[in-house]
Amino acid sequence: MIETREAQIVEERAVRVRQGERERLARTWAHPAGFWGWFTNVSHTAIGIRYMVTSFIFFLLGGVLAALMRLQLAYPEQHLLGPDRYNQIFTVHGSTMIFLVVVPMMFQGFGVYLVPLMCGTRNIAFPRLNAFSYYVYVGGGLLLWIGLLLNIGADAGWFAYPPLSGPQFSPGKRVDFWAQMITFTEVSAMAVAVCLATTILRYRAPGMTLNRMPIFLWEKLVLSLMVMFAMPAVMVVSSMLLLDRLVGTQFFNPAEAGDALLYQHLFWFFGHPEVYILFLPGAAIVSTLLAAHCRREIFGYTPIVVSVVATGFLSFSVWVHHMFATGLPQTSESFFTAATLMIVIPTGTQFFCWIATIWNGRLQFQIPMLWVSGFVATFLVGGLSGPILASVPVDTQVHDTYFVVAHFHYVIIGGSIFTMFAGLYHWIPKMGGFLMNETLGKIHFWLFFVGFNMTFFPMHILGLRGMPRRIYTYPPEMHWSGLNLLASIGAIFMAAGVLVFVWNFLQSRWSGERAGDNPWGAGGLEWATTSPPPEYNFLELPTVNGREALWDAAPNQPIVVGLRSDIQELLVTHSLDAEPQLKEKSEGHSIWPFLAAIAVSLTFVGSIFNAWAVPIGAIPVIATLVGWLWPRGSSPPAPEVVGKEA
Amino acid sequence: MEAYREKLLLDVSKLPSVAIGRRNVSWLGNIFYMVIEGTMFLLVIASYFYLRSRSVDWPPAPYMPPALRYGIANVVILLLSLLPARWIQKRAAAGDRPNVRVGLFILAAMALVAIVVRWFEFGALNCRWTDNGYASTVWALLGVHTGHLITEFIETFLIGAIACTPKMEGNRFADADTNSVYWYFVVATALICDLVIYGAPRFI
């Protein structure tokens, strides 16, 4: 009797300790409240959701532009849009979808929200830099779209080749808006790459060695490195274009020892890795979802990880296949054809591993899996037309036709948008704490899937029949009308599908079923906390015993204790074996990243109109950075405690 | 609750809360930024040689190669600046605030001198950025590097200013150490840029 009483006292004390800890953590990690609080928040969950919501809004806007184009092309010789407006619309559509939707959603949005949770930590590395990246991204999006709404939008295509985009053939400010938007979005993506790679390498839960790291984290690590190596190229080239246009440099002027093809080399040195920067997040979502919804560890963990790394490397050796029509030497054409075909190997490996996972798993065919199936079907079609285009004679024949438009929409919508919806249906229950409606989810899927194939499959045939890209109308005697009408009807289905999703989201948010902590019974650490997670992510920091942390956890799996709950303290672990090394105080909430982003944005925009904006704008930029970096409060004890690592 | 009581505990309370060098998280972030900026330098250099391959003479006639005097002066200044940078690292590891402060201000002063000399270096390039593709890439390369010099001057001066206050403690010493690592990067890229700007027109 006495023993029972003692046990009860111990339990009650444990409950009180946990409750006290919970309250302290909630106070320490609380998100700032109020209007200004919104701008000072540097929490990864808040910034991650903002990235996703903002990029989804841009997705809707880019979709409106696509619908306008399909409306224009539904019948021959229509004049709903004039050629100038049409140029702006296809340029802003492509630029929006690539720079403002897919990368910010799939890399930044999913990455910023999920990576710290999957690592089992309480915030991202360099949270202020992360918050800064978001505001800069918004600045870039506004710049591009305000230009369009003022009818001075970018109009030289999403890759803006000179000489068309140069000072001679594109006077005015239109191309400048595009080029400076690139600077904004790439600064943002590179900042997030640094934050994510550092988080993955230094904040993983004890026990999560590299060999146990979820494939999602592997992919985000590889992707971050790809962003670091690829995105400087587009920043360099768009800056060169701006300099040619604004201060009279001659980088791309062949008359003055410049070269227009230099632009294409630099652009595609970025552009082709970018294709995999668009695809790999989708592949990682598929690998993660398949394990969760097939109730088994992913088949072929090691081959998949090797494939992701190999894709990262190979993606830097194929850029010239975008330039086959420029008259390159035959040897380099052969080399780049072979390199392009090699990409099939790692991609095919991942496909076979996914099929094997489904084959041997206990498949739960819920909405996320429906989207994964849609991805497999569509990406396969897009993937197969890739090797066809890698062949120089075919590429030369269909270059700049709708065949190419069909190919890259199959790859990008298949690889990124289908997987985006799969990921949203899978993780919205975690982020919002509610389940999406199954019936509406199915209607969304079928409308989108059928509409997508109606829209883009006929474009293969249109391309083979010689319909060029970027024409605002066509004469009836070309016999392209029927297929164009079919494509436009398909676009209506797609748009209806997306509207159903928005309705489903809003309705489920207000009245949907509560999700619970782990509605799918998945094995990742993000499911080890409540839905939505508290501000401090985990009451008890977890340790890891296998690749699927929750499934492989021992009955007495250790938890981490000893981190302070009165300051925002994080556990730093070794890059390889995730052994605990250090406790680190996270940067707190601050208004300075927002102010710095404003100062940087004004400087970027001002530089389009006057070069003096750069030195003048540097003053507020420096001032805000000083405010950002100036230490406040007290730092942990002096370094003699540790000394320098040998 | 039983499960809670049965759980094993991994106690990290004894772990240090400050580390200088590779264990510090900012050190890794700094390396990643060097990767990004190093890639930018390489791409501008690649552009330079790409344009070189498209031109018969280099620099295109009648332009002369850049004059060497200010370039050499800056190389000397930057190489000498490695001494205070290294000294800061050593003193930061020992938590020696007065000497770290002195080292930071010496380094900032040397960065400022390098910026002033750089101004004259632009004047001795024997071309203007508007002249041709060669001139544009030379100005771009030196311009990107000058941007690094200026930001590094500001950062070093800022950490020096923090070192004048009681806030110079703990992780701020790690910042001083990381700043030195970044300075090495700035010096290394200067040497590579100089090899291209001054060497390529003469030897390639």
Image: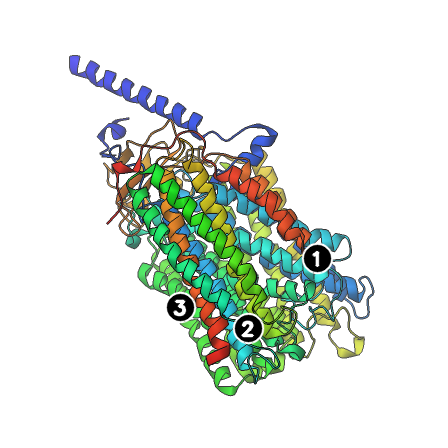
Q: Position of residue A617 (x, y in %)?
A: 63, 47
Say if A352 sits above or below A479 in the image. Answer: above
Front-lying residue, B172 or B164: B164
- Please tell me if label 2 and label 1 are on a single chain: yes
Which residue type carries mark 2?
Answer: His
Front-lying residue, B30 or A458: B30
| Chain of the residue on which disc 3 is drawn | A
Which residue type carries mark 3?
Answer: Pro
Q: Is residue A101 visible?
A: no
| Chain of the residue on which disc 2 is drawn | A
Quarter holding residue A635? top left
Choose the circle earlier in sequence order: 1 or 3: 1
CA gap between label 1 and label 3 equals 35 Å
Choose the circle earlier in sequence order: 2 or 1: 1
| Residue linked to disc 1 | A65
Q: Residues within 10 Å of mark 2 (few under 14, many from 20)?
A: some
| Residue linked to disc 3 | A346
| Residue linked to disc 2 | A265
Q: Residue at x 72, y 60 (%)?
A: A174
- Please tell me if label 2 and label 3 are on a single chain: yes
Q: Position of residue A595 (x, y in %)?
A: 59, 40
Horizontal arrangement in the rendering, residue A469 relative to residue A559 (left or right): right
Q: Is residue A88 visible?
A: yes
Hey, which residue is sitting farthest bottom in the picture? A330
Q: Residue at x 43, y 72 (%)?
A: A344
